[in-house]
Amino acid sequence: MQATQPPTSATVLVVEDNVDLNMAICEILESFEFEVHSAKDGYDALEWLKENKPDMILCDIMMPGMDGYTLLKHTRGDSSLRTLPFIFLTARTSVADRRMAKEIGIEDYLTKPVDSNDLIAAINNALRRRQIMQAEMQEQLNGLRDRIVGILQHEFRTPLTFVLGYAEYLLDVTSGDFNVDELRTSASAILDGGRRLQQLIETFLLLAELQNRELDMQEIGRVRATELWMDTKQEFAQQCDAAGLHLDLNCANDDAYLFADTEMVREALRRLMDNAIRYRRPESQTIWLSVELVPPATYVGLRIRDEGAGMPTEQLKRYATAFEQYDRDNRTEPGAGLSLALIRHVAHLHGGSLEIESELGVGSSFTLWLPAAVSGEA
């Protein structure tokens, strides 16, 4: 098989403890116009990777000090290196070794001695696959950028209009006679608009953070589900009292526990509560909170039910996409789409899901399903 030139000018890190073989591989790669850097073992490679980033890594498995598997683990644990193509070049030929290598995510597995054309072909194939993946990621980023532009145009418009409109009004009335109550109303509207803008920005930034976040196991703990709702209820008590709303907490499954990043889940519940309050119908007086279980109790559901505007069935699927909000142009409150996207990310990070049930003109039910903590676990 005739090897071809690399898809683009690419840098390959060669990690091989055998000096003669290391030099021979580097010479082959250089003859095909690759940029090459060599390392004598895993430690040497990691030291070089602190200041440099190749386009791929070609690595021996059996090396003194740090073997190839350990080096792979380190690169996959580094966000700046984890997407690098990784090829093993080794004397190990067993089926078990090949299977293990594939399971841990390497691009190819070559056995020594390797034909130079096969080596170059394997490297070029890995680089092309990476180029395709990068192009797909760029397309996704472009789509995200377009949706960000959409959110800036639509969701920020209402609170910004409040702020600017009432600010202009204040400038007009302060030049002549003014009414203290009218000034107080205008100042209150400006404050409310500013708070809405602040919440939109905070939600957007948190959602962006969650896009690439993994759970920190040190933050995971066993927590009683009802306790999470009780904390949320207490946090919103004053706001609900002022609005004449009653929060009805059903404690039927009071002994249900889950493992979670409690602060992250509390943030999700805050968003659910805030949406229920904001989008209720004027005559609505109650918001229902409950803890649900799915036999055999492998998941715990934190459910909130309201008597809000509701959504038609055909619109529910749209909430699977970030930044979607039903009837955006007719809403007076921005940000529900952002909040639900954030809640969905919290659920997915925990291995759970967000279930939405709604009927237009009747109300909605949102259930955050999270893995249950088995009885007796600490």
Image (tube, helix red, strand yellow):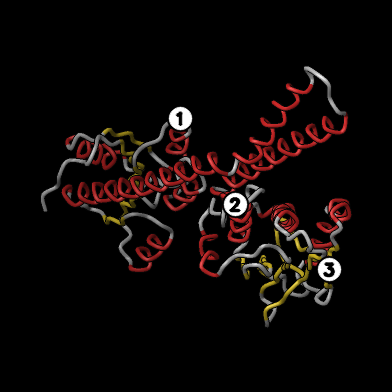
Q: Residues within 10 Å of mark 3 (few under 14, many from 20)?
A: some
Query: Residues at badges 3 and 1 in contact (C-beta under 8 Å)?
Result: no
x and y percent of residue 142 in the render? Answer: 41, 43
Q: Is residue 312 above or below residue 179?
A: below
Among numbered discs 2 and 3, the one appearing first in the sequence: 3
Q: Which label was assigned to residue 330?
A: 2
Q: Nearer the viewer, mark 1 or mark 2?
A: 2
In terms of sequence position, does the residue under pointer 1 or pointer 2 come before the other? 1
Q: Residue at x 64, y 65 (%)?
A: 310
Q: Amino acid at mark 2?
A: Asn
Which residue has dot 3 on it? 249
Q: Is residue 201 left or right of residue 50?
A: right
**Label 3 residue SS:** strand
Q: Residues within 10 Å of mark 2 (few under 14, many from 20)?
A: few
Q: Residue at x 27, y 55 (%)?
A: 110
Cα distance between the residues tagged 2 and 3: 31 Å
Left or right, 104 with respect to 164, comes to: left
Q: Which residue is mark 1?
A: 51
Question: Which amino acid type is marked by label 3?
Answer: Leu
Give residue 66's mark. none
Say if residue 311 shows up in the picture. yes
- Mark 1 lies on a secondary structure that is loop
Of labels 3 and 1, the one closer to you: 3
